[in-house]
Image (cartoon, rainbow, N blue to C red):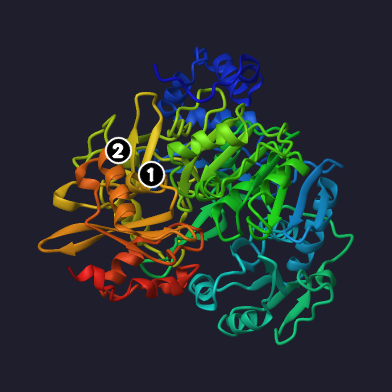
Amino acid sequence: MIQPLWQPSSGRIAAANLTAFARAVAARHGQALRDYAKLRAWSVEQPADFWVELWRFAEVRASRPWDVVLQDGARMPGARWFAGAKLNFAENLLRQRDDHLAIIACTEDGGRRSLSYAELYDRVAQLAAALKADGVRPGDRVAAVMPHIPETIIAMLAVTALGAIWSSCSPDFGVQGVLDRFGQITPKVLITVDGYRYNGKPIDLRPKLAEIAGHLPSLERIVLVPFLYPDAAPGALSRAVPEQDYRLRGAKLEFVQLPFDHPIYILYSSGTTGVPKAIVHGAGGTLLQHLKELLLHTDLKREDRIFYFTTCGWMMWNWLASSLAVGATLVLYDGAPFHPDGNRLFKLAADERISIFGTSAKYLDAVKKAGLEPGQGHDLSALRAILSTGSPLVPESFDFVYRSIKSDLHLASISGGTDIVSCFVLGNPTAPVWRGEIQTRGLGLAVEVWNDEGRPVVGEPGELVCVKPFPSMPVGFWNDPDGSRYRAAYFERFPGVWTHGDRIELTEHDGLIIYGRSDAVLNPGGVRIGTAEIYRQVEQIEEVLEALAVAQEWQDDVRIVLFVRLAPGASLTDALADRIRQRIRQNCTPRHVPAKIIRVADIPRTMNGKIAELAVREQIHGRPVKNVDALANPEALALYRDLPELRD
């Protein structure tokens, strides 16, 4: 009989936030909800009651209570949550003002800084006062090109304390990539750094920033944080002032009280099929959803130190920042994850006593393929959870975590996205972990798997949908006054139902397996195949570092073409190609076997590290790729142009 890879101890279950929450709900509503399945069913059937109970449990701070919990609850989109409530997002993240560490920040060159909650509060107050004096008001946009450092967190809190809207990109974005995003939202202020280090190399940003600023006529101020060089001058940046001179010391922090759905964040879609969608997220929905995921699904507590390897251009940065609302300590790392080697982040985990470690599935696979054994030579005794997202976590990576990192920890594969600035499917710290499966659907989210006819299915792949409104749905898209683009993005296929665009399966354990993005599904001979099914097999072959599969239009049908990036010294011999095909055939179906296997030197990725399947598909067909600047390595696309292997 198949056994789970991990089960929480009875003591861990008893001490979990989720257990305390279920107990509180049962006491108030007279429900016997000690079983997680019953709790989740109740949360979906009684969404208004669930979100109210979460509000109470998380002790959300608001200056005015709500009049109606859920208004127009049958409409999606269109439902309104906690109508009448007034609150401030930053106030909820800055409720602690003591000497407990709020942030530990490390860089790849060995630098380390820390800030207590009291120091963080003071720094936010100083910057907020300066921004207010500069005329920043509720609804104004403040943009940032920033690395993963404390000043980015400080700036976001200062901006949202004033009721302004925060939007950020990481400094590795190209000029056009930044302009495609910030050019839509006309920011009043730009907050940035002089430069940063990556993989041991110093990168001066000021020339690029000057070009960006020259194309943003709405800018009235640039705040420059010296990061690469301590005495960095603005250089060619007009209207720029060093951050240390800009702050107003001794200022008192005032939190502007605003409606529940007042915008705080603008995030962007990957943009590989056109100009990125500017997705607007509201204060209350973001706060509640993040608190739910951090408290209940991650079991975050004040004594925890939580880390996520992310950049400020990925929604996991926003998610991580919300950990401040729990009073935990954020551990930030800015730099390359493999500098000087693949042990870098595990050394950080050991040195800083990280208890919750977040990363990508690709990183875990890269560590495995490098032959590393992080559990040996690193004291990971404080580590009790690993979170993985960005792409599906393959079963073999589950094995690797429990074999080579730590046998007693909660491994949570999670998935959601920029669209909801959170997760649809994620972990349950009180339940077993089954090999290759995401543990559960999020509490309060009516997630189902539908077939092409719009009927719920179990045990077969289908569309991830959400059939009821939830608080972290976007407020809307920027510059979409009638909401038509927003509705087309999520509600066109099944009217009134959120269609997320992931191909997914609900398992017998009520867990989930993701097979890739629906728009990248392969369809040879009319059979729908998720690309992750192929990657899961191919990337277990030692010589293959990573792979990308697309459908090529061929002879009135389509055929699967598999591109592979190989390990140094490996060659794509006939024998290796046969092994790849044999593994796919044995572990998937004959339909999954690629017609062509082609070696490439690189695989194009989005800024968030996701494989750009659609861009490659367009490239091999000679069609224009609409937004090359959305790629982290756009030069890789040239490798796929006019390949002779695709002509026969």
Q: In this view, does 343 lie to the left or right of 513?
A: right
Q: Is residue 344 left or right of residue 47?
A: right
Mark 2, Cα crowd under 10 Å, few <14 / some 14-19 / many 20+, is: few
| Residues at marks 1 and 2 touching, judged by CB atoms closer than 8 Å | yes
At x 35% / y 66%, what residue is drawn?
A: 615
Q: Is residue 499 left or right of residue 395?
A: left
- Name which quarter of the figure residue 200 lies in: bottom right
- Please state which of residues 512 and 368 is positioned toward the viewer in this rendering: 368
Position of residue 6 measured from the top left corner of the image (x, y, whole percent): 54, 24
Q: Mark 2 points at which residue?
A: 587
Residue 535 against residue 601 in the figure, above or below: above
Q: Is mark 2 on a helix, strand or loop?
A: helix
Residue at 54% over, 78% down: 175
Location of the C terminus by quadrant is: bottom left
Gap in angstroms between the C-alphas marked 1 and 2: 10 Å
Q: Is residue 480 something one can see in this rendering? A: yes
Identify the amino acid type marked 1.
Arg
* Residue 606 coordinates in the image, percent (x, y): 46, 63
Instruction: Point out which mark residue 313 bears.
Output: none
Q: Which residue was labeled with disc 1? A: 536
* Number of callouts: 2
Most extreme residue toward the right is 250
